[in-house]
Amino acid sequence: GDRALDWVRAENARTEAELGDPTTSPLYERALKILENKEKIPHVAKYGEYWYNFWTDAEHKRGLWRRTTPESYRTDSPEWEDVIDVDALGAQEGESWVWKGHNVLEEFDPSTGAA
């Protein structure tokens, strides 16, 4: 609640007073450039026929959950289909959504009881 947020704000202010603004650090700038680099190799996970990836960059600070085919992924410029655009969803709903991961359920066949 508000009490917890007040404590966090106070601790952040105390830390920043002691260490300085982290966004002015050369290390911060270097790390940000790495994280926002469009040339990074996307890590994928296979679910069904598609390979999925969570991607962040300068335009998608909160991220994209996207998918492509294995054939497309093996090309120099894979064609990605957006599954969830966290930034766009937040703007549309007026919320500050944060990606916390995903759970993928296997399809279930009720006639056999098999996944």
Image (cartoon, grey):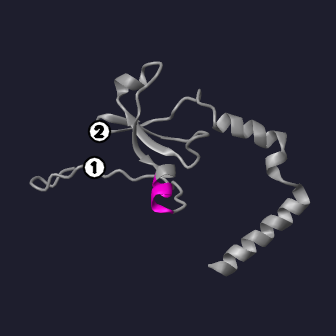
Q: Is 60 left or right of 18, judged from the image as shown?
A: left
Which of marks 1 and 2 precedes in the sequence? 2
Residue type, numbered disc 1 = Glu
Q: How far apart are marks 2 and 1 (CA)?
A: 9 Å
Q: Is 95 left or right of 11, judged from the image as shown?
A: left
Q: Position of residue 73 (x, y in %)?
A: 42, 26
Q: Name the mark on residue 8.
A: none
Asked whether 92 falls inside the magenta stretch, the response is: yes
Q: Do the residues labelled 2 and 1 touch (CB within 8 Å)?
A: no
Q: Name the mark on residue 106.
A: 1
Q: Name the mark on residue 48.
A: 2
- The magenta-colored residue range is 89-94
Q: Exactly how many numbered labels are in the figure?
A: 2
Residue type, numbered disc 2 = Gly
Q: In what element is the residue under mark 2?
A: loop
Q: Would you place residue 106 above or below residue 71 in this image?
A: below
Asked whether 53 falls inside the magenta stretch, the response is: no
Q: In which quarter of the image is residue 65?
A: top left
